[in-house]
């Protein structure tokens, strides 16, 4: 039998309630939770990670299920698909202007704003605790990293202090703003 303290049970109920509130608000805004999460993925991922397979990994779902989500977003005019210049058989996904616009009313952003209103130490501790819980529940090694270039063994900063770098994995220049984006291929140094 699993035992927990009253405080742990209270925290669990709060997580469940917040999740339910978020899903309700996401549905009210006209997109289902998977569609919102795919839009967030495309807004945060670097260009090497804006593919259907990367979105499937971000959503922790199958290629087929992710494909249905992406087709729905394309039909709504929120996502556009183009040929991947690095892989003729692949495609690269981009948010449209409408897709970027709808993220301005992302219900998850209001949760983040509320968390940001906590004392800074509480915010940090909350983030670390929730990440630990997620890792314990899902298994950290079962999920791809989706981290920025800093700390990736494939990344070499270009001299000059601009923050621009070179990716050895993709043999490509990584612009300063893109180096801070999430990458599915990040490999810890
Ligand atoms: S350096 Fe690493 S994190 Fe950055 S683009 Fe290359 S593989 Fe991805």
Image (tube, rainbow, N blue to C red):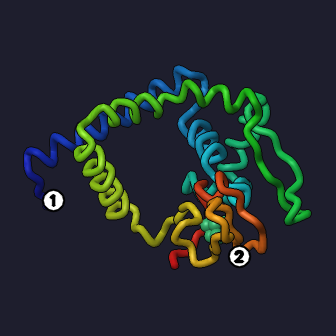
Using residue 90 as the reference point, say whether residue 47 is left or right of it.
Answer: left
Quarter holding ligand 1: bottom right
Q: Which residue is pictured at 32% across the width and 64% down the height?
A: 136
Which quadrant of the figure has residue 178?
bottom right
Mark 1 neighbour class, 10 Å CA radius: few under 14, some 14 to 19, many 20 or more: few
Q: Name the one closer to the observer, 21 or 104.
A: 104
Label 2, on which residue?
169
Using residue 34 as the reference point, say whether residue 118 is left or right of it.
Answer: left
Where 95 sits versus 46, above or below?
Answer: above
Dot 2 falls on a residue whose secondary structure is: loop
Q: Which residue is pictured at 57% across the width and 32% down the height?
A: 32
Q: Name the one closer to the observer, 163 or 155.
A: 163
Does the rendering let one see residue 128? yes
Query: Exactly how many numbered labels are in the figure?
Result: 2
Residue extending furthest left? 6
Q: Which residue is pictured at 64% across the width and 74% down the height?
A: 156
Label 2 – label 1 distance at C-alpha: 44 Å
Dot 1 falls on a residue whose secondary structure is: loop
Q: Which mark is residue 2?
A: 1
* Residue 74 drawn at (x, y percent): 78, 36
Q: Which mark is residue 92?
A: none
């Amino acid at each position: 039998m699993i035992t927990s303290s009253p405080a742990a049970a209270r925290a669990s109920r709060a997580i469940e309630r917040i999740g339910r509130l978020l899903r309700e608000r996401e549905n009210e805004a006209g997109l289902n939770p998977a569609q919102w999460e795919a839009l967030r993925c495309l807004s945060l991922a670097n260009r090497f990670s804006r593919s259907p397979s990367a979105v499937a990994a971000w959503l922790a779902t199958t290629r087929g299920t992710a494909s249905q989500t992406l087709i729905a977003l394309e039909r709504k005019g929120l996502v556009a698909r183009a040929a991947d210049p690095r892989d003729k058989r692949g495609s690269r996904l981009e948010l449209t202007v409408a897709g970027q616009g709808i993220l301005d009313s992302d219900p998850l952003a209001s949760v983040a704003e509320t968390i940001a209103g906590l004392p800074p130490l509480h915010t940090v501790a909350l983030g670390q605790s929730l990440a630990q819980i997620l890792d314990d529940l899902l298994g950290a090694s079962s999920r791809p990293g989706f981290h920025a270039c800093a700390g990736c063994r494939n990344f070499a900063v270009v001299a000059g202090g601009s923050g621009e770098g070179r990716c050895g994995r993709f043999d490509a220049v990584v612009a300063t703003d893109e180096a801070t984006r999430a990458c599915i291929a990040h490999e810890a140094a």
